[in-house]
Image (cartoon, rainbow, N blue to C red):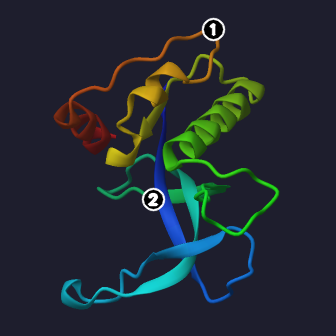
């Protein structure tokens, strides 16, 4: 069967409260480089499904947001964690959902940016009957996605 393609990426949601759980100071992306400013935000990892291409287009359907609050954030019931660790939790959840849906043999391809290019992610991928492959060259992945 065709592989299930997912995308993971960090997202920051601006907040104005200093007491809202999970909020922390960050460099404001809306200010110019020559006049950096700060604001508050909550950090999450967005897990989305990439639909098969139709007429050259594909959609990213959001599945779930996972908290990735820094250690400096206002305390919340979730412990602080790095973005790649929240991404691992998201991939483990997705693999479990696919297995429970009777798709244990279906390959799961996850695409992420440089925040997930750390040694720890390869050492802690969820265990299951299948195997995890090292990343393919970007050209090969993009070629495969384009042909979908």
The residue drawn where x is 48% and y is 58% is 10
Q: Which mark is residue 27?
A: none
* In the image, residue 94 above or below residue 71: above
**Left or right: 102 with respect to 34?**
right
Which mark, by number, is residue 59? 2
Question: Quick check: 50 left or right of 91?
Answer: left
Q: Looking at the figure, which quarter contains the C terminus?
A: top left
Q: What SS does tag 1 mark?
A: loop
Mark 2 Cα-neighbour bin, 10 Å: few <14, some 14–19, many ≥20: few
Report if the CB atoms under discs 2 and 1 are less than 8 Å apart. no
Q: How many marks do you count on the picture? A: 2
Q: Position of residue 114 (x, y in %)?
A: 32, 46
Dot 2 falls on a residue whose secondary structure is: loop
The residue indicated by pointer 1 is 129
Asked if residue 121 shows in the view, the reply is yes
Asked whether residue 3 is in view, the answer is no
Q: Nearer the viewer, mark 2 or mark 1?
A: 1
Q: Position of residue 32 (x, y in %)?
A: 24, 89
Residue 24 appears left or right of 26: right
Residue in view at x 64 percent, y 14 percent = 128
Residue shown at 47% from the left, 30% from the top: 121
Quarter location, residue 117: top left
Q: Is residue 16 above or below residue 13?
A: below
Q: Nearer the viewer, residue 17 or 125?
A: 17
Tell me the crowding category of disc 1: few under 14, some 14 to 19, or many 20 or more residues within 10 angstroms, Cα based. few
**Image position of 132 (left or right of 88):** left
Q: Please, which residue is most extreme toward the front here? A: 72
Q: Who is closer to the viewer here, 143 or 69?
A: 69
- Give the alpha-carbon distance from disc 2 to disc 1, as whole Å: 30 Å
Mark closest to the chain's N terminus, 2 or 1:
2
13 or 54, nearer to the observer: 13
Residue 28 point in image, percent of width and height: 40, 82
């Amino acid at each position: 069967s065709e592989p299930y393609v997912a995308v993971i990426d960090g997202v920051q949601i601006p907040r104005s409260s200093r007491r809202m759980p999970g909020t922390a100071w960050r460099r404001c992306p809306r200010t110019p480089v020559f006049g950096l400013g700060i604001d508050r935000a909550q950090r999450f990892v967005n897990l989305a499904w990439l639909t098969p291409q139709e007429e050259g287009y594909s959609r990213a359907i959001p599945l779930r947001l996972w908290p990735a609050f820094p250690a400096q954030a206002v305390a919340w019931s979730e412990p602080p964690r790095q973005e790649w660790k929240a991404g691992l939790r998201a991939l483990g959840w997705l693999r479990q959902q696919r297995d429970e849906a009777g798709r244990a043999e279906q390959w799961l391809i996850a695409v992420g940016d440089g925040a997930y290019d750390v040694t720890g992610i390869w050492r802690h991928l969820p265990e299951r009957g299948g195997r995890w492959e090292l990343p393919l060259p970007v050209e090969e992945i993009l070629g495969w996605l384009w042909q979908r």
